[in-house]
Amino acid sequence: MKYRADIDGLRAVAVLGVVAFHAFPALVTGGFAGVDVFFVISGFLITGIILDQRDRGIFSIREFYARRVRRIFPALAVVLAATFGIGWAILFNDEFNLLSRQIAAGAGFAANILFWREAGYFDQSAALKPLLHLWSLGVEEQFYLAWPFLLMAFGASRKRLAWMFAIVFVASMAVNLHYVHHYREAVFYLPQFRFWEFIAGAAIVLVDEQRLAGRWPDRPVVRHFLSVAGLLMLAFAMFHFDSHLRYPGRWAAVPVLGAAMMIYAGPASWGNRMALSHPLMAGIGLISYPLYLWHWPLISFLHVLKVANPWILGASLEISLLLAWLTYTLLERPVRSQPAARIALALCAACFIVFLAGVAGFMNLAKPRLNFPELNNVITARNDWAYPPPHAAKADFDEADVYRLKGSIPGEVLYIGDSNIEQFAPRIDSVIRSGRPTYSAVFLTKGGCHPIPNVTKEPKDDVCPDLEPAILDYIGSHPVRRIIIGGRWNPGLFSPEVYYHFSKGDYMPLSDPRARKAAVESFRTFTATLRKHGMDVRIVQNIPSNFNGLETLDTDGARLTFLHDPRRAFAAFNPRIARAIAVDDAGRRIIADVATTTGAQLIDPIPHLCGDESCPLLYESNKYVYKDEGHLTADYAARYAGFIDDTVLAPR
C-alpha cells in the first residue's frame, strides 16, 4: 500500500487531541475522540494491506502477525518496563498491586477488559491509573485477531465482502446505541461495541477500488469539500464534546465520519495537502504510537505525586515528545529493518518477561519500595469496600442498577440512596445468609448521587438520574415491605461545589439557603409520598464524618515525605490514633425533622459507633473502623453494624 503523508498527519491530529485532553481537559474537552480517529485509520490501513496482498497471492497470516509484533511490541515493552520501575519507586503497596495488574493486562492486550471489570464508584480515579490508555490498544489488537480471517473468507468476492462489512457495521453500531445508556463502561471498553469504527475505515478501501475502476464518481471539488468538512468535524468533536456525553453512542459518529471523509479525500485534497501533509504534522504522526504510550504514564504519576500543575504538565508533554522520538529513532526503526519472523520471537519473549513481572506484582511476589506494615494497615482500610456484595444478582430497572439479595420469606426491602447506604450491604448479606427469617434486600442506588429528588451533582449532569419515578414504579410492581433511605446528608446538604437543586430549568448550589430549603422540602415530600403508598420508611443518619484523626487515612498527603525518607516519615505518621470526635449536628437535625414530620423511623448509627464524646477509630487493636471520611470498612460493617439488622429481618 502506497505511503500517504496525510495519513500520518491524521495520526498527529488524533494523538495531539488525546494528549491535550489528558493534560488539559478543560481546554480540549473532547480530545478523547482522537482514539476513534485511530480506529478508523487502523481499519483502513489493515484492510487495504490485507486485500492487496491477498489479491496478489502473497498474504500470509503468520507474516501478518509477525509484522504486528514488530510494530507494536518494541515500544510497548519499553514503556511497560519503565512504568513498572517508576511504580516500584513511588507507589504504595495497593497502588503497585493495581499497576502490576495493568502491566500484565497491557502485555496481554486485555487492558480494556481489566478496566471494564474494575469500573465502579470506588474504583481508582482515572488520573491515578498509569496504563489506562492501553484500553484502546487492547480493542485494536482484539480486532486484529478476527479481521484477517474474515477478509480471507469473504475477500474473493467484493460483493460478499461489502455485505459482510455492512452486517458487522450495523450489528456493532446497533448494540452500541442500544447498550450505551445502561452499560456505559462495557460499551466504552469492549471491542464488539467499537468494531463499526474500524469498518468505517475499511469501507473506504472498497469505495476507492470502485473509484479507480471508474464505477464511482471522482470529482476533485468533492474531495476538497470532504477534506475541509472532515477536519471541521474533528475540530468540533475535540473542542465541543465533553465527558458528560453518553460516549461512544451516536456522538462517536462525528469523529468517525470526519476521519473517514479525510481519508477518502486523498493526499491531493486541499485540507489534507495543506494541513495533514505538512512535514511537522507528518513527523508527529510517525512518532504518534510511542507518544501515545509515553504521555499518559508520566501525567498519571504526576497526579499520584500531587504535583500536576499546568507548568509541570507542560514539561511532561515535552519529555513525552523527546521519549517518543528516541523510541522511534533508536528502537522502532532499527527493529523494523529486521526480518519480521526473526525478530518477532525475541519481542514476544521481551513482552512475556514484562507480563511475568506484572503477575509477580499483583500476586505480591514483588513488593514496592514503600512497603511497611504500619502503612499497609491504612491501605487495607482504604480499599475495604464490598459493593455490590458477591452474592447479589444484578438486574436493570429504568436508569438504575439494581442488586438483589434473596431472603428466606416473601417480600422485599428496598434500599435507596448513595454509597452511604451501599456500605451496609455486607452486613445485610451476612444477616440474610445467617439463616434467620429475612425479606429479600434490593439495592436501587447510585454511588455519589443523593436520594433527594431534584438534587444533582453538577448542572446538567445526567450521571445522577432522577430515581424517584423508578422507585415509585418499583414499589408498584414488587412486594416491597420497607424502604430504607441513606445519603450523605452532611456535608452533602452543604456542599456548594458538588450538589445543586434543580427547579423549573434552574440549578442553584446548595450553599444558597433557598436551594437548601427546597432540597429539604423535596426530600420531605418524597418521603411523605412513600408513606402514602403504605411503605414502612426508615431513614439512616450518617456515621461520623467530621472527626479528628482523619489524617491517619490520608496517605496521599504524606507521599513526598515517604519518598524522601520513608523511615523518618513514621515519626510524624501515627496510624494508631484511637479516638475521634463526631461533629455532624446540622445535617442530623434536618434529617431528624424530616423523619418526625413524615412518620418515618430514624436509624442512628452514632450510639453504636461512639461513646458520649468520642468514637473509636480502631478495632481489634490495629484495624480501622473507617475506610475514609464517610464510610465504614466492609469488614467492620459486616461484623459489627448490627444496628442495621432490623431493616431486613422479618417481624417476629
Image (spheres, rainbow, N blue to C red):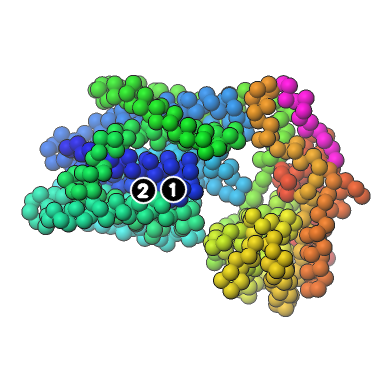
Residue 596 picture quarter: bottom right
Furthest-left residue in this view: 214
Observer able to see residue 470: no
For the residue marked with disc 2, what is the amino acid? Asp
In the image, residue 400 sits, relative to residue 63, either above or below, namely below
Give 247 or 8, whichever is nearer the viewer: 8
Q: Disc 1 residue type?
A: Val
Residue positioned 60% across, 25% down in the render: 368
As drawn, the residue found furthest toward the right would be: 612
Numbered tag placed on residue 281 in the rendering: none
Q: From the viewer's perspective, is residue 433 above or below residue 295?
A: below
Give the x, y percent position of residue 305.
Answer: 60, 33
Residue 215 x %, y % = 9, 56
Task: Name the residue beneath numbered marker 1.
Answer: 28
Which of the numbered marks, if any, corresponds to residue 36?
A: 2
In the figure, residue 588 lies in which quadrant?
bottom right
